[in-house]
Image (cartoon, grey):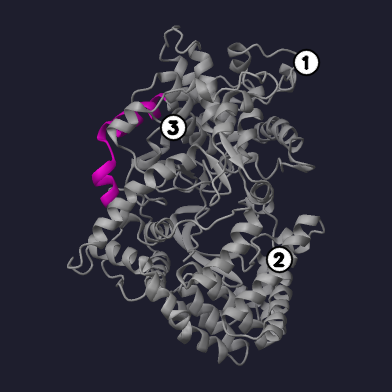
Amino acid sequence: MKQIFFIFTILFVTLIITSCSQETKKTASYPALDPKNIDNTTKPGDDFFQYANGGWLKRNPIPAERSTFGAFDQLQENNYLQVKNILESASLVKTAPKGSLEQLIGDFYASGMDSAKIEKDGITPLKTELELINNLKDYKDIQKEITHLHLMGIYPAFAIYASQDEKNSTSIIANLYQGGLGLHDRDYYLSDDARSKELRTEYIKHLTNMLKLLGENQASAEVGAMKIIALETQLAKVSKTRVELRDPVSNYNKISIGEIQKLMPNFDWKQYISDLGININEINVGQPKFFAEVSNVLKNTSADGWKVYLKINLLHALADNLNSAIVNENFHFYGTVFTGKEKLKDRWKRILGETSGSLGEAVGQLYVKKYFPPEAKKRMLELVSNLKKSLGERIKNLAWMSQPTKDEALKKLAKINVKIGYPDKWINYSKVEISRDSYVMNSINASKFHVRRNLNKIGKPVDRDEWDMTPQTVNAYYNPNMNEIVFPAAILQPPFFNMDADDAVNYAGIGTVIGHEMTHGFDDQGRQYDKDGNLKDWWTKEDADKFKEHVGVLVKQYSSFVALDSLKINGLLTLGENIADLGGITVSHNAWKMTNPKPDKIDGFTPLQRFVLSYAQIWRQNIRPKELTKRVKEDVHSPAKFRVNGILPNVPQFYEAFPIKPGDKMYLPESERAKIW
């Protein structure tokens, strides 16, 4: 089940993968820098991404089940097997005590692997839920069903979640966020470009097929599909763009329950709050215009229109947990049509992902116990300390920032909390009802648990020991409300972190990750939060204006990059990640230089060349055109190629390491380079 967690974090990489951080023999044999990856037929100054990775790209075509294949995907394939061993071992223990890690994980995984039972059951496990929807009569009934689905972790129309108050980080409040779009982005409904038109046409076919799988005849399914499109298009018209959603100030609108009742007169907020089982007097409405329209759509859309829309929301959320006909139809649209994937993942990989997602810290406990090396945490703390010193020096020496703003920035940097490896306290899943009887019910029960756990935080003290990622996640994040950087255990492995590699490689890898996450505290979003995690302006007006001027250079650069055909990168959408990429490599290089690296060559490359090459090789990736198109539209991260070719021309050390000269495609005159942190 695709659960939705609304947490304001800025992630380093978009691919989240289950992984294993230690198989000592494999780690030791992982090359620090592989010269075979290099394409010597390409001039470094013309396309450094191709130069650094061309050999690898040629040897590693995209597997049929994937839309991309890169360094992260390689890790995933190698480490899926490790997590699989954990899950399979647990599934073989049929007498584990109820509520134990082994029982929960083992029964969840075993229920998903029982394909014969899942095929036999078909949509029978959803019979009760579908009957509830079929019996809806008016918009009051519809509201009750929306509430019911929200408590299941399914979010038609909009989402509610608990998180820190943006302007009072010691408090947990309720928040509302726009949603309800099956195509995931407003522009797919409203744009007239060829790709958007194609997706709308294919989406209607997909909706028709899904409704037929629920038992509708062809004519009824076609009518239902058009009703869904009509309702979602109304929501899309008042949805904010992805660029607009990046503005934390405009998305902070805390009002009383009485005020939201006036905003949404056709929605009974007292009843909704009561049915959710929470007690609140105020709520942050992320996008007021959107919620006003939800009120209108609620009343003006027929009950039949709402019923078919709610059925599809239910089915989409649970599609991967049902029989093969539904799984295959869902994959055809969201996998093949949307991203170009040619083949569904092997069943065990899909069930592994669902188990790890639903019982994340349960799997994480066993993962850490078996695979996380303590020496990696010790080395990381040392690296983080060095990166903090480096960023501090950068801030102190900024020519464009005044001393009062520097002082506040240094206070914020000093207060950044660091979490490495895994939580000190684990989530207790023992009360979640998990059995071998029904895979889909296991997913529903786990999702209900997460929703209730989240909503129960409202009004309670902030738990600063809590993590927003599991240890088996290869990723990292900065949380502005916590003012913290977090590095799960699974990212502490090659190519990011190699215990046997030279410092140039590790600083270019995990060092840039650390620097990237620290810089998020000072990007165009993160800079708006103070040292305590509050949305508060601590900049002088002059310094804020200078910051906007400096980052404007990066916006202009990225907005000119063509990702595919005539499709350009959105420099505003990707600004935060681009700032963090530039800051990450700059701060990490500065920290590396503080270690006084030896000038010796390795594999024919100087230490500085190895640093630059290692940074580029982290981003090696082949990507399908459909996936690239999707990411340019939806992703706040720039495509991998431009995380190399877009950033390096702004880095002075790039020109020191390689003979980049005027006339080369990647050469930028110094006056045109972005200089931020």
Which residue position is annotated with label 3?
Answer: 496
Q: Which mark is residue 202?
A: 2
- Point 38% across, 71% down: residue: 439
Question: What element does badge 3 sit on?
Answer: loop
State the image coordinates of residue 571 (x, y, percent, origin top left): 71, 40
Q: What's under tag 2, amino acid-wise? A: Glu
Image quadrant for the C terminus?
A: top right
Location of residue 201 by image quarter: bottom right
Type of the residue with mark 3: Phe
Q: Magenta stretch: residue 379 in it? A: yes
Residue at the right extreme of this rendering: 192
Give the residues in magenta.
Answer: 366-386
Q: Position of residue 398 (x, y in %)?
A: 59, 22
**Percent of width and height locating residue 495:** 44, 31
Query: Distance of mark 2 from mark 3, alpha carbons?
Result: 39 Å
- The residue at 53%/15% (across/down) is 609
Crowding at dot 3, Cα within 10 Å, few <14 / some 14-19 / many 20+, comes out as many
Q: Which mark is residue 663?
A: 1
Sequence order check, earlier mark of 2 and 1: 2
Closest to the observer, 11 or 372: 372
